[in-house]
Structures are given as C-alpha cells and as structure tokens.
Image (cartoon, rainbow, N blue to C red):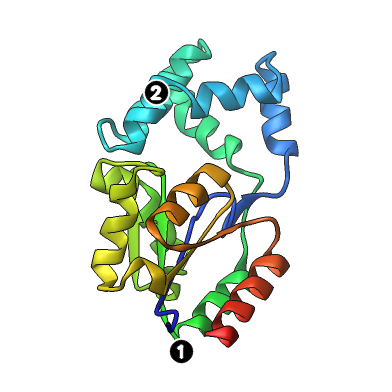
Amino acid sequence: MTLRAVFFDLGGVVVRTEYQAPREHLAERLNLTYEELSTIVFEAETARQASIGQVSVDAHWLAVARKLRLPASEAKAIHAEFFAGDVIDRDLLVFIRSLRLRCKTGIISNAWGDLREYIVRNRFDDAFDTLVISAEIGMIKPQPEVYELALKQFQVEAKEAAFIDDTPANITAANALGLHGIVFRSPTQVKADLKAMLDHR
C-alpha cells in the first residue's frame, strides 16, 4: 500500500542538542552535574504537567528556578541558557519538505505549550501539514490515542503511515498500532530508510 503520511518527533530528531557546552557551563555554575540539571528540568512534576498542558511553560521554569534556589527573575535566562546548544536541522527540513510532493508530513511530539510558537517563530511550520503536540491534546506518547489522533487528522490508516522517533518505546507503541516505525539514529539513516520505504511502496 502507498505510504500516505510520515510523522516525525521533534526533540531529538528535527531539533537536537548538538552542543552540550552551554548546558554543561550552566550546570557547573549551579554546582550540579549535567545529568542532575537535566533531571530537574525534564523529570520534575511540573515538566510532566507542562507536557499535558496542565501548567504553562513559564510556571514550569519558575518551579525550576525555585528548585535551583534562584530568584524568579532568572527563570527566563535559565530557560534560554539550558537550550542554547539546541540546533534545528535545516537540511533535514529540506528533505521533509520534499516528501510533501508524495505524502503528508506531520509532527507528533511530547512537548510543552510553547512548541507551536517556537516552530512558527523559527519558520519551519511550512514543512508540516499538522502538529500533534502533547500539551495541546492532554496526552503523551506512547499512549496509543496520540497516534490514533494523528492518523485521524490525516484520514489515513496506520499501515499507510511512517513514524520517526529517537525513543524506542515510542516506536514500539507505533508499531503495535500498525505504523511503520523508524528509530532515529542519524539524519542520513532516516533519509535512507524513508527513501527505501517510499520507493518500495
């Protein structure tokens, strides 16, 4: 059957932390390890709540500042410095745009409520037909309902869609529903896998 849709995770796929130095310097300044700082940011209860839209991004970063024993006035600066090493893969986006000649493309991302604005501000919303963002729908991968919602938006069956994610558990969940899951290891690998899939079908 023809592949009619390709969904991509955002963080770790289209946007990746290519430079660890900013985060390492921030951790060192706060007398923390890189891992300890990442845990505070990504695994706090407010991070989970932000991922399903229960608290705002600003509220989460205020909670992070409190955890770090910093004044609220530093929350935005900590936010900016923490993500300063992230890079948008513009070359991969060129490839994704090229896919739209043959199928629909979308994002399925566990992300906080500022993701849509981030994508628009950085001018790559044109690469995707739809954005399924956990903070907007109140559910996170690997819940099957997340993938089912994305498929419904495109009006395609699972076997007509591919999904790329850097987290194996999310791929396992997608495969269980019948999607063609691809674990992201590198842009080159994903391009080759998708090209082979499209050519085969």
What numbered label is drawn on residue 101?
A: 1
Disc 2: CA contacts within 10 A as few (<14), some (14-19) or many (>=20): many
Asked which secondary structure carries label 1, the reply is: loop
- Image depth: mark 2 or mark 1 in front: 1
The foreground one among 98 and 4 is 4
- Sequence-first disc among 2 and 1: 2
Residue drawn at x 38%, y 41% as measured from the top left: 112
Q: Is residue 32 visible?
A: yes
User: Which residue is rendered at x = 59% and y = 50% of the image?
Assistant: 166
Q: Badge 2 is on which residue? A: 62
Name the residue: 50% across, 80% down: 97
Query: Mark number for residue 60?
Result: none
Residue 6 vs 78, above or below: the answer is: below
Asked whether, in this view, residue 90 is left or right of residue 147, the answer is right
Q: Position of residue 56 (x, y in %)?
A: 30, 34
Q: Secondary structure at mark 2?
A: helix
What's the residue type where badge 2 is placed?
Leu
Residue 105 visible in image: no
Q: Position of residue 142 (x, y in %)?
A: 41, 43
Q: Hey, which quadrant is residue 138 in on the image?
A: top left
Query: In the rendering, at what x and y percent does residue 12 appear?
Result: 59, 50
- Give coordinates of residue 64: x percent, y percent: 46, 21
Q: Can you tell which quarter of the image residue 22 is in?
A: top right
Residue 58 in the image: above or below residue 170: above
- Look at 26% across and 57% down and name the residue there: 149
Give the alpha-carbon distance from disc 2 to disc 1, as whole Å.
Answer: 43 Å
Q: Amino acid at mark 1?
A: Leu
Q: Residues within 10 Å of mark 1 (few under 14, many from 20)?
A: few
